[in-house]
Image (cartoon, rainbow, N blue to C red):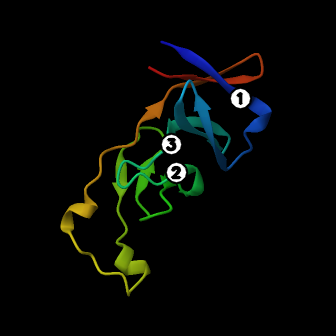
């Protein structure tokens, strides 16, 4: 394991997330309901920044197409059709719905700092 220092624990407020750059790699770090998490910076669907998203239960929701990923496992758990929310948007290609799971990184706190295991 290669844990990298990301930020001070005081930099991470509950029910928020931020973008960090570590050794040229962008990651999202946040806290939801008191639990720290770290994940890939971008949605695996269409590469939107996830720190612009929001939370739904234990999921992080992508701001672009409302895809939801479980914060514990990274599994894609819900796809909300853009058409359901924006009736004027027309799906051009059924492949747009394809997405992999979100990469989740192991997190720990040491000496007041958030550390993330980055391979």
Visible residue check, residue 32:
no
Distance between the alpha carbons at the discs numbered 3 and 2: 6 Å
Marks 2 and 1, the one that precedes in the sequence: 1
Mark number, residue 50: 2
Is 51 rendered above or below residue 35? below
> Residue at (47%, 57%) from the top-left corner?
62
Secondary structure at badge 2 equals helix
Residue 64, horizontal then vertical, whole percent: 46, 63
Residue 115, horizontal then vertical, whole percent: 63, 22
Visible residue check, residue 3:
yes
Callout 1: few (<14), some (14-19), or many (20+) C-alpha neighbours within 10 Å? some
94 left or right of 24 in image: left
Residue under numbered circle 3: 41
Asked if labels 2 and 3 touch by Cβ distance under 8 angstroms, the answer is: yes
Q: Quarter-wise, where is residue 37 in the image? A: top right
- Judging depth in this view, the residue of 80 and 95 nearest the camera is 95
Residue 56, horizontal then vertical, whole percent: 53, 58
39 left or right of 102 in image: right
- Judging depth in this view, the residue of 17 and 70 nearest the camera is 17
Distance between the alpha carbons at the discs numbered 1 and 3: 15 Å
Secondary structure at badge 3 equals loop
Residue under numbered circle 1: 7
> Residue at (41%, 38%) from the top-left corner?
73
Callout 2: few (<14), some (14-19), or many (20+) C-alpha neighbours within 10 Å? many
Secondary structure at badge 1 equals strand
């Amino acid at each position: 394991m290669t844990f990298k220092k990301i930020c001070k624990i005081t930099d991470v407020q509950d029910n928020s997330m931020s973008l960090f750059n570590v050794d040229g790699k962008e990651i999202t770090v946040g806290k939801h309901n008191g639990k720290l998490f770290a994940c890939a910076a971008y949605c695996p669907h269409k590469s939107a920044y996830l720190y612009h998203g929001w939370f739904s239960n234990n999921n992080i929701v992508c701001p672009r197409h409302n895809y939801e990923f479980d914060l514990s496992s990274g599994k894609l758990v819900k796809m909300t059709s853009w058409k359901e929310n924006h009736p004027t948007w027309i799906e051009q290609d059924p492949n747009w719905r394809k997405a992999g799971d979100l990469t989740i990184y192991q997190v720990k706190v040491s000496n007041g700092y958030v550390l993330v295991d980055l391979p």
